[in-house]
Image (cartoon, helix red, strand yellow):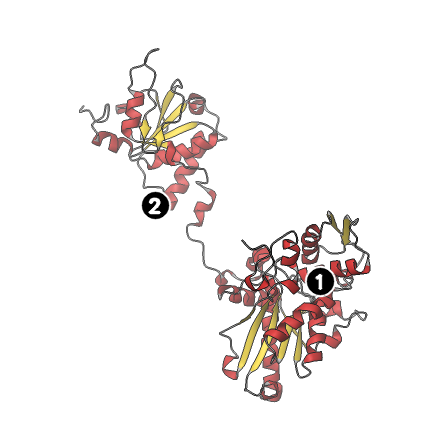
Amino acid sequence: MPTVTSPSLNVYSGPNALVDFYDPDKCPPAPLVEVPEHPWREQGVRIYAKLMSALPAANVKSLPALNMLLRARESGELTPETKTIIEYSSGSTVISLGILANIMGIETVKAYLSNKTSPAKLDLLRFFNWESHIRWTAHQILKQLPDIKVFATCIGTSGTVTGCGLSLKRYKPDITRVGVCTSPNDRIPGPRMYSLLEPVTWFPWREAIDTMMEVSSPEAFEYSLHLCRNGLLVGPSSGMAMLGLFRFLERTMKEKGTLDHLRNEDGEIPCVFICCDGPFQYISEYYDKLPESHFHPIRNSELLGVDSYSYNLDWEMTPAEAHSILFWPKGPSNPSPRVPNDRGKMDFDSSSEVVVLDLRAEGDYKHMKLPNAFNLPIGRTQNPYTHPPTMVEIFKEIDGRVGLGASNDLVRCLDGKVVFTLGYDGHIARLAMSVLRNRGLEAYCIMGGVEEWETLSLAPFGMSN
C-alpha cells in the first residue's frame, strides 16, 4: 500500500494527503482536451478545452482560494491560531475557500455580500486571484501546448484572464488573447458585462487581452450543452468561452480574409479556451434559457406524480401461502402458521388479525369471497405497470380511498390489522399493497390473484359452484 504522495499515479497519502491533493504543484496538470469536431477544423484550427472543472474542488476558483491561503501563511497573517476566515463572496471562491480552509485546520469560513457595494467591486477585491493563474494555470498550458497561438476565456472577476493573459504574453509574444464578456443586460453565471468591468482601473485586466467578444446567455448555455453531450461536462461559461473564440476567428476571417497570420510553421492554429466549472449547479437554468426543442421529451411524464411508494419482494405471497393462513384451523393450541415462501418466512405476528382487501368488482366479490374480506371495487383493468394511463387512474383511486390521508369506514376496518390484498391477476393487489405500506399497515399482496388461486384448485375459488 503506498505511503507517499505519487503525482504520476495520482496517489496522495499520509497526514498531508488532502492538502497535497489540492496543491497544483503536487498534482498532474488539469486536463487539456482537444475538441475533435468544430466548424474551423478544416481551416487548420485545433481547439483545446482546459478543464479547470477537473480540479479537486470542481471549479477554477480553488486556485485563487489556495493562493490566498498560501500567501497569508507566508506573510504571517495566517497562523496556527487562526480559527475564522471572512470572504466577500457568495460563489465558487468561498466554496473552495471553505473546503481548503477546513483541510488546513481552519474551523470557520464566513461569507459576506454587502447590499451597498456593487457586485463587480466585491468580486474584484480578491487581491491574489490573478497571481494564482500566473503561478499555475498559464504555466500548465505552456507545458501542455507550447505552440499555442490563441487563448480565450470569459471575464468575470478577471483573475483568470489577467493571470493567464499576462503570463502567456510574456512567454509567447505572438499569442492572441481573447476576453469574452456577457452581452449587455444579460446574465451568465460567473462572467460579467463589459459595463461592470469598464470602471475598474486598479486591476490590470486590460493589459491581459488583445480583443474582446460578447456572447448572450442562450448562446452560452447552448454551446455548453453541445460540449456536455459530446463528452466534456462543462458549464455555461465554458460554452461562452468557446463561442467567443469562434467569433474571434469569424471576425478575423471577415476582416483579413485569412487566418494565416495566426498559423504556426506546421500550418496549424492551436487554441485554448478555459472551462471554469461543470454544468450541474446550473441544470435548471438550461431549461430556462433554452427552448424545449433542445431537450429530449419525457415520455409518460404523467407517471412522475404517482406510484412513488416502496415495494419489496418479501411483501408478496402465493395463493397457496395465503390459503394456508386464511383457512388454518384457529384455536389456542393451533395458532396461524408462519408460512415459508421463496424469500424466507411471512414476517407478521401469528397472533395478528388477518383481513383481506378484495379489489375485484363488487359483483364478483359478492359471488365468492375470502374470510374476513372487505371490498374496494376496482374491477378488471389493464396492467397498470405496462399501461401508464391505467397506473395514474388506479393509483389515485386507491391512494385516495386507503392511502395515508384517507379517513373512512374501510380504512378503519383495515387499520391495526395484517392486510392481504387480492385482485384478479395480482397487479392491482401489488399496487394496493404499496399504498397500504405507505400508510403504515402491514400489507402483503397475493400474487397471481384469483386466476392463480383457481388454477391451484384451492378453496373457495378453485372449487366448482
**Within 10 Å of the Cα at label 1, are there few (<14), some (14-19), or many (20+) other Cα atoms?**
many
Identify the residue at image location x=45%, y=23%.
415
Residue 349 percent location from the top left of the image: 40, 21
N-terminal-most mark, 2 or 1 = 1
Amino acid under label 1? Answer: Pro
Residue 211 percent location from the top left of the image: 68, 78
- Please give left or right for residue 145 compared with residue 378 in the image: right
Q: Is residue 84 visible?
A: yes
Identify the element where label 1 is drawn.
Answer: helix
The quadrant where residue 421 appears: top left
- Along the viewing direction, whichever of 237 and 95 lies nearer the viewer: 95
- Please give left or right for residue 283 compared with residue 352 in the image: right
Mark 1 lies on residue = 64
The image shows residue 93, relative to residue 264, as above or below, that is above
Q: Is residue 370 visible?
A: no
Query: Gap between marks 2 and 1, in whole Å?
Result: 54 Å
> Which numbered mark, 2 or 1, is in the foreground of this view?
1
The quadrant where residue 51 appears: bottom right
The outermost residue toward the left is 464
Q: How many marks?
A: 2
Mark 2 lies on residue = 386
